[in-house]
Image (tube, helix red, strand yellow):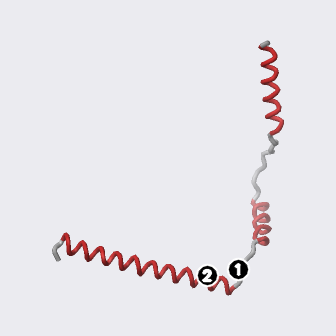
Amino acid sequence: MPSSRRSSAATKKSVAQARRPVVAAKRPSRFRFITDTISEMKKVTWLTRRETAYLTGLVLLVSITAGVVLGLIDLGFSSLVDTLLLGG
């Protein structure tokens, strides 16, 4: 009976090995990398100039607004610490 267990275990192992794809080790090629990169860049859907300008403006607006809000919060905390801890 132990021999049948070995054979089924060996069979399961060989089936699992057979299912795995065999991948050949390829050396990366700079030329292939560049051609693949160019190929992928051609597939990209680029924004129009108008969309890019709109989104850039939106990012600048949000960044400036966040900077002003955080600056005011910092000024408030600075004033609070000055008043409470330094008595000033």
Q: Nearer the viewer, residue 80 or 43?
A: 80
Across and down, in percent, residue 78 comes to 28, 74
Across and down, in percent, residue 65 comes to 46, 81
Q: Is residue 7 left or right of residue 52?
A: right
Contact check, label 1 and label 2, Cβ < 8 Å: yes
Secondary structure state at the residue bearing disc 2: helix
With respect to residue 34, does 21 lie above or below?
above
Across and down, in percent, residue 37 comes to 75, 66
- The circle drawn on residue 55 is 2
With respect to residue 44, does 53 lie above or below?
below
| Spatial separation of the CA atoms under disc 1 and disc 2 | 10 Å
Q: Nearer the viewer, residue 19 or 8?
A: 8
Residue at (82%, 32%) from the top-left corner? 15
Task: Read off the residue under disc 1.
Answer: 47
Residue at the far top: name it.
1
Residue at (65%, 82%) from the top-left corner? 52
Secondary structure state at the residue bearing disc 1: loop
- Amino acid identity at mark 2: Leu
The quarter of the picture where residue 29 lies is bottom right
